[in-house]
Amino acid sequence: MQKKIIRFLKGANGFVSGEDISRAVNISRAAVWKHMEELRASGYEIEAVPHHGYRLVSQPDRLSALEVHDGLATKKFGAYIHHFDHIDSTMNEAFRLGDAGALEGTVVVAETQTKGRGRLGRHWSSPKGKGIYFSIILRPSCAPSDIAGITLLAAVAVSEAIEKKTGLKVLIKWPNDILYDGRKLCGILTELKAEIERVSFVCVGVGINVNTPASQLLPEATSLKNIKSEAFSRVELLQEVLKVLESRYRTAMKEGYAPVFKEWRSRSATLGRKVRFTDRGRSIEGTAFDLDKDGGLLVRLHSGEIIKRVAGDVLL
Ligand code: BTN
């Protein structure tokens, strides 16, 4: 109901009477008044003037379902949004929902996380209201070994969305760190619940530094605001990420990952670069030269030997 009222107020371009609202959304005047109070409590600034009615003055900069659904151009991704002011980690809640049978495309998003986690056990800093911190549940019918494709797919989709909304040309460091000018703008974490041969569900967690001020960023990180010296709408960026993610995912489920990998290669900060990593206690240095068909990183050592890196990180 509140969604309908907000949409009506946004479309009104000025004052609308309580009577018009009650007719448009089919509730009593008293119910309109009650919803207005609740909307104000959620951060909507709504002016009420006798004989004129109500006017939406401003909306909160929050990633609530009410805000994200208005203008979301997806079929399934984000159809269900669980929004939290604060949470330990959106991954934990997404896992809980996944276990309880939540539909594919269900999103958990938070304004801040107290225990945001990154890859390889790292912490993900989540300053309140500054970034986008969300997890989405996917239910691909594939084996656990095929999941690397989803990780790279998410990086491609988020890069495309950032580029569309900001004009910035960002690069991807294998497997899925999104960088600008060598500094990290976005991290993606893929976790899954699976049996030996079948994935039950996947949670893809995305953290984007959107309006994070320099004072709250690690030296090796950056944010969109830090780069462009302007603030960006987190709602619009999240809507775009969900749209591109859904489109890339649907194509990959029908046709495989080849189109995603092609795009990943063209955005890679890793291919053609010297890389270093540790493999079963052995320190390895070589040149990353391609992805293999499963999304693993192919590295040519100085000896000519070719090694495939399937998980972990590489140092550039
Ligand atoms: C990384 O680069 O190491 C991955 C970072 C992933 C961070 C996101 S923020 C939303 C989701 N919830 C988490 O706890 N982590 C992911």
Image: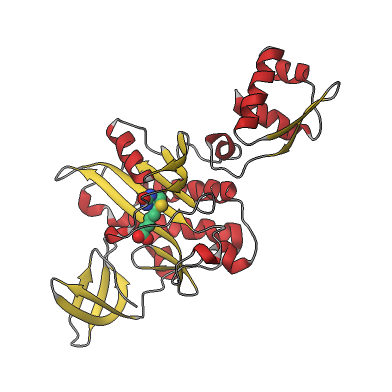
Q: Is residue 230 above or below residue 245?
A: below
Above or below, 83 against 304 in this view is above
Note whether 281 is above or below 7 in the view shown: below
Instruction: Residue 144: tell me if it is visible.
Output: yes
**Visible in this render: residue 153?**
no
The reply, left or right, for residue 201 in relation to residue 265 is left
Which residue: 57% across, 50% down?
Answer: 234
Q: Within the image, what quadrant is residue 200 found in? A: top left
Ligand 1: which quarter? bottom left
- In the image, 27: left or right of 222? right
Q: Nearer the viewer, residue 59 or 78?
A: 59
Quarter of the picture containing the N terminus is top right
Total label count? 0
Image location of residue 124, percent across then percent down: 38, 57
Instruction: Find the residue positioned furthest to the bottom.
Output: 302
Which residue is drawn at the image coordinates 51% and 40% (left, top)? 74
Task: Locate the C terminus and report the quarter of the image it occupies.
Answer: bottom left
Q: Residue at x 44, y 54 (%)?
A: 207
Q: How is the image coloured?
A: secondary structure
Residue 175 shown left or right of residue 81 in the figure: left
Q: Residue furthest right?
A: 51
